[in-house]
Amino acid sequence: MLSVKYTANGKLKLIIKKGDRTDMKILVTGAAGFIGSNFVFHMLEAHPDYDIVGLDALTYAGNLETLAPVIDEPHFKFVKADITDAATIDQLFAEEKFDIVVNFAAESHVDRSIEDPGLFLRTNILGTQVLMDASLKYGVKRFHQVGTDEVYGDLPLDRPDLFFVETMPLTASSPYSASKASADLLAMAYHRTFGLPVTISRCSNNYGPYQFPEKLIPLMIANATADKPLPVYGEGLNVRDWLYVEDHCRAIDLVIHDGRVGEVYNIGGHNEKANIEVVKIILEQLGKPESLITYVTDRKGHDQRYAIDPTKIHNELGWLPETKFEDGIRKTIQWYIDNEDWWKNIISGEYQQYYEKMYGNR
Ligand code: NAD
Ligand code: DAU
């Protein structure tokens, strides 16, 4: 592995560990989604000699436009495929001989999982199994499962002293979190039973460029921009722990290279905010009135508070978040202002029907 370290006098030092390769081939599934695409951008920049294959089924959440900046890069290739399609996945693994697999592909929206749990179980659990079977068969050296903090359930609002740690038992509130917890358990079972070299990361809420406008931050930016009501669930007091997407990508890069096989790493930056605080920050930055806030019926089973303890990844791998929320949210709002075409295309199509169904009579 090639890494850059600063020496005591502040000079750059390049380190190549003996025996490490600089020409890995990495499969990134869910590459046309929010975090997967940001991870592809990060990896192409951080590891210019690696070959990255980005796979995506291009569901409603996947957008090939997002990968336009890298689609012609010689070290990048896009494959349209479904991770539940075992025959296609097997053939791809046979041809490509991946060193590392990073599985972002998933149905990721909690509200949609309440409408259609079956799809979440198929993609998030069975899709992970298909990828792990192929990884075992073709000798993949690291299978990384991108997990979520939602597998720890939630924390009460009146216990700010409590945080999620890796050793907590898994529990779940929504079909989405249940499917992600199942995938984590299955990944650990493949490690113990078959010896698959697995790592798992569990991250808190991400925000940043290319997030689908059904999620809190981009949805509120899009609605505020159009002077539409901002639908806040319940009283807006639920707390999420926000992390800028690039910080998440750097953390996964560290885990796949230097993380210990069979281990789980929590990722989060102690940046807890009540939803209503986030919404008010967005309105203030866009110069829009708080009268746009509309309190709507709460989400079923709504988790109260998420809060990650990232001590393990910090102590073992030296990871720390680099982007403060004030900077990250400013950059994110600016990105949505500068890239209106990207999200306006998305919300002009079938998303309108989704929006009407979810928010029409709320
Ligand atoms: P996203 O919905 O933006 O992207 C998911 C991608 O997976 C989409 O491009 C979609 O087309 C693709 N996909 C869906 N089903 C597929 C299938 N059967 N085969 C191939 N591709 C398929 O989601 P995201 O927010 O980028 O999340 C990515 C991963 O990170 C998910 O596993 C999610 O659980 C996890 N995660 C997300 C967050 C967050 O805050 N967004 C936090 C922690 C963990
Ligand atoms: O914690 C990690 C998880 O974060 C990921 O695993 C999920 O894939 C990702 O979607 C996210 O889940 P959340 O449910 O926390 O994110 P969402 O953006 O849907 O909602 C954030 C909070 O905002 C939550 O408390 C619900 C609330 N909310 C959401 C929407 C869409 C509203 O008040 N109004 C809304 O319209």
Image (cartoon, rainbow, N blue to C red):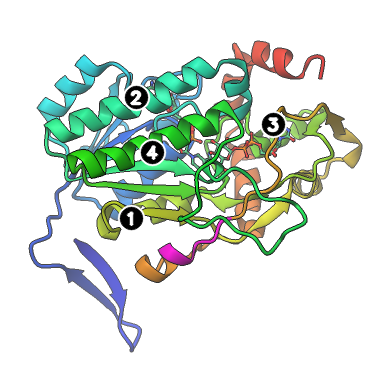
Q: What residue type is labelled 3?
A: Gly
The segment highlighted magenta reads 308-313
Query: Residue 262's x, y, as percent?
Result: 29, 51
Q: Name the residue under label 3.
A: 301
The residue under the point 75% across, 33% down is 225
Q: What residue type is labelled 2?
A: Gly
Please state which of the two labelled residues, at mark 2 or mark 3, is closer to the viewer: 3
Q: Name the residue under label 1.
A: 255
Disc on res. 185: 4
Secondary structure category for the residue under label 1: helix
> Is 141 above or below relative to 46?
above
Q: What residue type is labelled 4?
A: Leu
Q: Which of 56 and 85 is in front in this view?
A: 85
Secondary structure category for the residue under label 4: helix
How many angstroms separate mark 1 from mark 3 (CA)? 32 Å
Q: Which quadrant holds the C terminus?
A: top right
Left or right: 225 with respect to 292?
Answer: left
The answer to whether residue 24 is seen in the rendering is yes
Left or right: 173 with respect to 8?
Answer: right
Disc on res. 127: 2
Of callouts 1 and 3, the N-terminal one? 1
